């Protein structure tokens, strides 16, 4: 499939329940710089009680002039399923973007098992509040986390999870993150390899991660001029960033070669 803008675009589906999942197994190539996302899923069952039931799976090849996969505001209350990339992605912006998904629960996980090459971040998963809005995420990744088993080549961060509050009194609170971040593949990044954090910018803006209990594990290879694994965010112009409780482990393990049992 050759397209100027999005290869697959599903937007503004104001259903209370979206059931069935979304799958791509073909080749997608886009050309519009800034707008040419490979797959766009935005504002689907995004109202306060909205529920998305199903998996989002890519096993095809995506060459995108913008983001490879862009998932924003899907399942306003609950996202019951997982996000899986099994196909090669080449993106002029971020490889995989996930934002404001399942504010009351994300029962699946995000798994990458193919090569992602991106000029910006490889995987970017965050919760965002702008202006003076507030977002509360009651349970993040109740049944899964962010996992990379393949190769990520990123101009900025390899894998990012966190939150952004941008505006006077904007706030994001992640009450519980029960998953984790795991890399058993290869990450080559221009900034940090794996980062748990966020940004709060402007007067009284705040990001609070109340409880992170999943841990961060690397058993693969990370090459990054910044930090290999970084935990922490920044507040500027009167904003504040807080991680109240971190109960998981941060582990850098020896890489196990194929065929080795030690």
Image (tube, grey):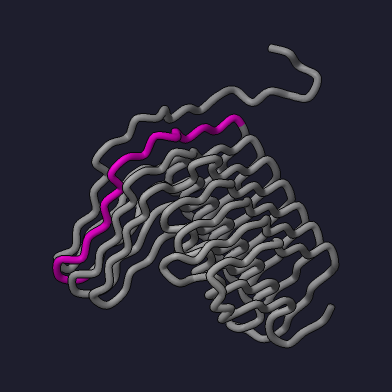
Is residue 250 or residue 108 the one in the foreground?
Answer: 108
Q: Is residue 153 above or below residue 12?
A: above
Q: Residue at x 26, y 52 (%)?
A: 208
Is residue 28 or residue 132 the one in the foreground?
Answer: 132
* Horizontal and vertical percent position of residue 65: 67, 77
Q: Residue at x 38, y 66 (%)?
A: 128
Q: Is residue 79 above or below residue 195?
A: below
Is residue 127 or residue 154 the one in the foreground?
Answer: 127
Q: Residue furthest top?
A: 262
Quarter occupied by residue 4: bottom right
Residue 203 drawn in magenta: yes
**Total numbered labels placed on residues in the image:** 0
Is residue 122 or residue 228 the one in the foreground?
Answer: 122
Q: Is residue 226 above or below residue 185?
A: below
Which region is colored magenta?
202-219
Q: Residue at x 60, y 61 (%)?
A: 96
For residue 187, side relative to residue 204 (left or right): right
Q: Where the N terminus falls, by quadrant?
A: bottom right
* Horizontal and vertical percent position of residue 98: 53, 62
Residue 97 drawn in magenta: no
Quarter occupied by residue 120: bottom right
Q: Where the C terminus falls, by quadrant?
A: top right
For residue 39, side relative to residue 245 (left or right): right
* Horizontal and vertical percent position of residue 113: 72, 46
For residue 117, side relative to residue 17 (left or right): right
* Horizontal and vertical percent position of residue 57: 72, 57
**Could you tell me what secondary structure mostly forms the magenta stretch?**
loop
């Amino acid at each position: 499939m050759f397209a100027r803008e999005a290869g697959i675009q599903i937007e503004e589906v104001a259903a209370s329940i979206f059931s069935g999942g979304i799958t791509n197994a073909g080749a997608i190539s886009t050309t519009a710089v800034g707008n040419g996302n490979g797959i766009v899923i935005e504002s689907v069952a995004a109202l306060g009680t909205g529920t998305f039931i199903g998996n989002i799976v890519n096993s095809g090849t995506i060459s995108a002039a913008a983001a490879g996969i862009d998932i924003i505001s899907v399942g306003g209350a609950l996202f019951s399923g997982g996000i899986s990339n099994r196909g090669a992605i080449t993106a002029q912006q971020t490889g995989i973007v996930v934002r404001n998904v399942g504010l009351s629960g994300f029962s699946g996980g995000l798994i990458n098992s193919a090569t992602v090459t991106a000029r910006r971040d490889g995987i970017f998963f965050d919760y965002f509040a702008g202006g003076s809005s507030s977002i509360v995420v009651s349970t993040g990744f109740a049944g899964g986390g962010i996992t990379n088993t393949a190769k990520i080549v990123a101009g900025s961060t390899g894998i990012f999870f966190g939150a952004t509050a941008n505006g006077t009194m904007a706030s994001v609170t992640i009450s519980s993150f029960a998953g984790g971040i795991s890399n058993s593949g290869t990450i080559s990044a221009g900034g940090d390899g794996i980062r748990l954090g966020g940004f709060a910018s402007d007067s009284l803006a705040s990001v609070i991660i109340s409880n992170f209990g999943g841990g961060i594990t690397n058993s693969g290879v990370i090459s990054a001029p910044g930090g290999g694994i970084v935990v922490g965010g920044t507040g500027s112009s009167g904003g504040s960033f807080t991680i109240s409780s971190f109960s998981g482990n941060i582990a850098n393990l020896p890489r196990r070669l194929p065929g080795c049992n030690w």
